[in-house]
Image (spheres, rainbow, N blue to C red):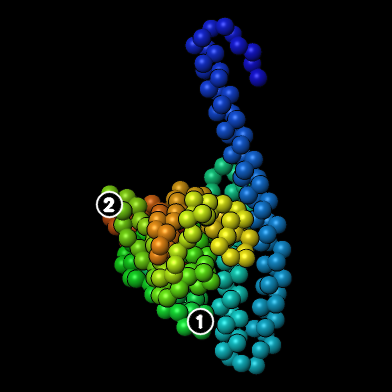
Amino acid sequence: RMAPTGIEEIDLVLAELVRTSDRMAGRLAAERQFGADASHQLRTPLAALMMRLEEIELLADSDEVREEARACLEQVERLVGVVDDLLRTSRQTAGGTTEAVHLDEVFAQLDDEWARTYAAAKRPLVFDDPGEILVLATPGALAQVLATLLENALKYGEGEVKVAARRSQNAKGVFIDVSDQGPGVADDIANDIFAKHVSTGGSTGLGLALAKDLVSADGGRLELSQRRPPVFSVYLAAVPPSLDPDTVLPPGALVTVGRRHRRR
């Protein structure tokens, strides 16, 4: 670091540059640690899980079992892609590839993946129709964040679980709310619910921590907007209807659009 010059104006600028440098160094260190956490906690067991699911899909006698294995395999493949994005994020200042994403397609994908699990638990799962709402997000990451919230609601919540989208008051953003009818989040952990190793049960608590980082990488935020009954809200920038890339861009335009949901 540079020694003080004795000139007040210059020393003030130098002090601010030092503080900025410290903040940037801290952020880079946090990103590297985040990438290491994601790699250690997720990447290795995911590879083994994919191999096991592929074996089940190949050897199962029941069509229902093969179909369930296929659905699980698609979820794991998407999660592997998310992990790859996280590791890239740890080496770069920017996040993953942000796209114009159709929420109705994300909701349909999640409904397809989670409907059977919720039905087996005798828990209603409801997706409100988001209409033509588009958000700026990384498709795989957004689906994984919402899947994390659905898993938590199934494990810790009660009653009906509802996923709904609403525009912000200024129409520049979109909130995606995931709610259930359970007792909610205890006051003693509510303020730290997104911190690593904070959990209402026996898990490591990494799910919500990683989910929050995924949303932040897309320029949004994930918050506990209501404690009892619990409501978790994902906020993302909205794409104005007048700028829908599906309708206003000429063929061949260099813009990435969210992947369409694959129907069977």
Q: Quadrant of residue 226?
A: bottom left
Q: Above or below — where is 240 with respect to 126?
A: above
Q: Is 156 situated left or right of 249 in this image?
A: right
Which residue is pictured at 28% across the width and 49% down the height? 170
Q: Residues within 10 Å of mark 1 (few under 14, many from 20)?
A: few
Q: Quadrant of residue 63?
A: bottom right
Q: Which mark is residue 121?
A: 1
Asked whether the viewer can see residue 180, the reply is yes
Which residue is pictured at 61% across the width and 70% down the height? 76
Q: Above or below — where is 192 with respect to 260?
A: above
Q: Is 227 situated left or right of 61 in this image?
A: left
Kindly state the secondary structure of the residue where label 1 is placed.
loop
1 or 2: tag closer to the N-terminus: 1
Asked whether the viewer can see residue 150, the reply is no
Image coords of residue 178 (percent x, y): 42, 65
Q: Residues within 10 Å of mark 2 (few under 14, many from 20)?
A: few
Amino acid on which the number 2 mark rests in the picture:
Gln
Q: Is 221 situated left or right of 18 in this image?
A: left
Which residue is pictured at 68% across the width and 59% down the height? 41
Amino acid on which the number 1 mark rests in the picture:
Ala
Number of numbered markers: 2
From the viewer's side, name the closer residue of 246 and 157: 157
Image coords of residue 50 (percent x, y): 67, 73
Report the residue marked by disc 2.
Answer: 169
